[in-house]
Amino acid sequence: MLRNVRAATPKPSGVTAIRMASDHADETIVSEPDPLGEITAFAVDPQDSRTLYVAGVKGSTAGLFFSHDPGNSWERKSSLEKAPRHFRILPIEIACT
């Protein structure tokens, strides 16, 4: 599990700043490039643990992203009206007769 969380964080060489609230209870990592923005939800595909899904908000734009290479690269799957706080991946059943 820790391996997947690490995959959603930027590479150290891309970190340009760390913003902290006055009480240091929350911090935001600023990096370039930053295709995901603020991550609001994270899920691992139950059938393939190398496939990760992230909901992110950058500015006023929310999107759903996925990675098939444990976070090394991300692709936008779709735009969202607003960023979800939770989502889950449901296995698809295909029946052949």
Image (cartoon, rainbow, N blue to C red):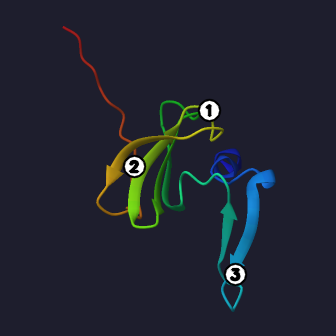
Residue, x 53% and y 54% (percent of image)? 36
**Amino acid found under the numbered disc labelled 1:** Asp
Q: Is mark 3 on a helix, strand or loop?
A: strand
| Of the pair 7 and 96, the residue shown nearer to us | 7
- With respect to residue 70, does 96 lie above or below? above
Marks 1 and 3, the one that precedes in the sequence: 3
Q: Outermost residue, top direction?
A: 97
Q: How crowded is mark 3: few (under 14 residues within 10 Å), some or many (20 or more)?
A: few
Circle 1 residue: 69
As measured in the structure, the alpha-carbon distance from the residue carrying label 3 to the one carrying label 2 is 30 Å
Looking at the image, is mark 1 or mark 3 nearer the viewer?
Answer: 3
**Amino acid found under the numbered disc labelled 3:** Met
Residue 20, numbered label: 3
x and y percent of residue 15 in the render? 75, 60
Residue, x 75% and y 64% (percent of image)? 16
x and y percent of residue 37 in the render? 54, 60
Q: Residues within 10 Å of mark 2 (few under 14, many from 20)?
A: few
Quarter occupied by the C terminus: top left
x and y percent of residue 93 in the render? 29, 26
Report if the CB atoms under discs 2 and 1 are less than 8 Å apart.
no
- With respect to residue 93, does 96 lie above or below? above
Circle 2 residue: 88
Marks 3 and 2, the one that precedes in the sequence: 3
Report if the CB atoms under discs 3 and 2 are less than 8 Å apart.
no
| Of the pair 43 and 80, the residue shown nearer to us | 80
As measured in the structure, the alpha-carbon distance from the residue carrying label 2 to the one carrying label 1 is 19 Å
Q: How crowded is mark 1: few (under 14 residues within 10 Å), some or many (20 or more)?
A: few
Report if the CB atoms under discs 1 and 3 are less than 8 Å apart.
no
